Amino acid sequence: MTTLVILAAGLGSRFGSDKQLEDIHNGNALFDYGIYDAIEAGFDNVVLIIRHEIDDLARQHLQNRFPGVPISYVYQDDFNPKGIERKKPWGTGHAMLCVKEVVKNPFLIINADDYYGKEGFKLMYNALNSGKEKTFYSGGYLLKNTLSENGTVSRGICEVDDNHHLLSINEATKLRKINDTTAVDEATGIEYPLNTFVSMNFWGFTHDVLDIAERYFTDFVIENKNDPKAEFYIPLVVQHAIKDYGYKLEVLPNHDTWFGMTYREDLAMVQTEMQKLIDRGCYPDRF
């Protein structure tokens, strides 16, 4: 078995609503296209990470959409650390931890509000079933193909060697294009070439990543319990696995265009791009 896990518990604060269920085309949400591409590539079941407050909407949306494909639901708010009051979810790494008892096989984890293209799913399915030991995977996207015209974005900046093995990954939280060759992280002032590989939360893991994440998250909560905005990101777990446990992370470059919805203003662009793909016959009009 190979599982698609979808991160759909975010609050959508910059977007202004629960963007994971936004109508992109004829009632389809953006993550429907990811499910379709994953099934086409060979993935055979889906786990959706959501909040209780959107449970009914999510189940209603997916009912009868992908017949024969098992779809499970886990709730990030069920796994919040005890005794700490905060509204903001604890981040992508914490969300991933929520599937520890549900997913025991290799899995791909993606954002609900991003479009990744078909090639990435095929590459990831093959990689996850290649039998390589102590190896995790990330989809390789170029920074220039992942920026928004409507504001800053957060990306995992990847440094790789000649074999596309990750050397380091750092979260840049306020990236903006400043010219034809460069983007800047406004949070730090650091500049990055536009041909830099970035992680778009398109991660391939075996179950052992969840054991590593669990140990690391316990320390993270102790250190950050008084910070209501601290987030436990998947790249932190990856760095920890490489540095302390001897894992490799292989970046899988692909040629597809990524696009997503960070801001409300991104919606029209996403709808236009999806219409082009539907017109080309890449997807049915409705799932």
Image (tube, rainbow, N blue to C red):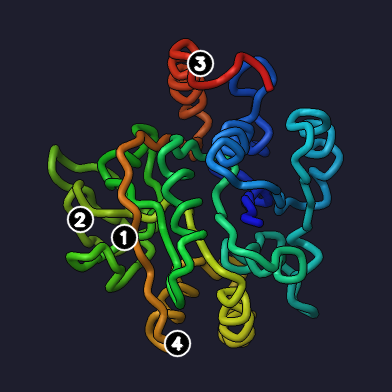
In the image, 250 versus 49, the foreground residue is: 250
Q: Earlier in the sequence, mark 1 or mark 3?
A: 1
Q: For the point 44% across and 58% down, which residue is it?
A: 127
Q: Earlier in the sequence, mark 3 or mark 4?
A: 4
Within 10 Å of disc 4 (Cα), the crowding (few <14, some 14-19, many 20+) is: few
In the image, 195 versus 85, the foreground residue is: 195
Q: Earlier in the sequence, mark 3 or mark 2?
A: 2
Q: Earlier in the sequence, mark 4 or mark 1?
A: 1
Q: Quadrant of the C terminus?
A: top right
Tell us which disc is closer to us: 2 or 4: 4
Q: Amino acid at mark 3?
A: Ile
Q: How many marks?
A: 4
Q: Which residue is mark 4?
A: 245
Q: Earlier in the sequence, mark 1 or mark 2?
A: 1
Query: Residue 192, labelled with which disc?
Result: 2
Horizontal and vertical percent position of residue 80: 75, 70
Horizontal and vertical percent position of residue 286: 66, 17
Residue 15 visible in the displayed image? no
Q: Which residue is mark 3?
A: 278
Q: Quadrant of the N terminus?
A: bottom right
Q: Amino acid at mark 4?
A: Tyr
Q: SS at mark 1?
A: strand
Relative to 224, say whether 184 is above or below.
Answer: above
Question: Distance from label 3 to label 4 (Cα)?
Answer: 44 Å
Relative to 4, say whether 16 is above or below.
Answer: above
Horizontal and vertical percent position of residue 41: 53, 41
Question: Distance from label 2 to label 4 (Cα)?
Answer: 29 Å
Question: Distance from label 1 to label 3 (Cα)?
Answer: 31 Å
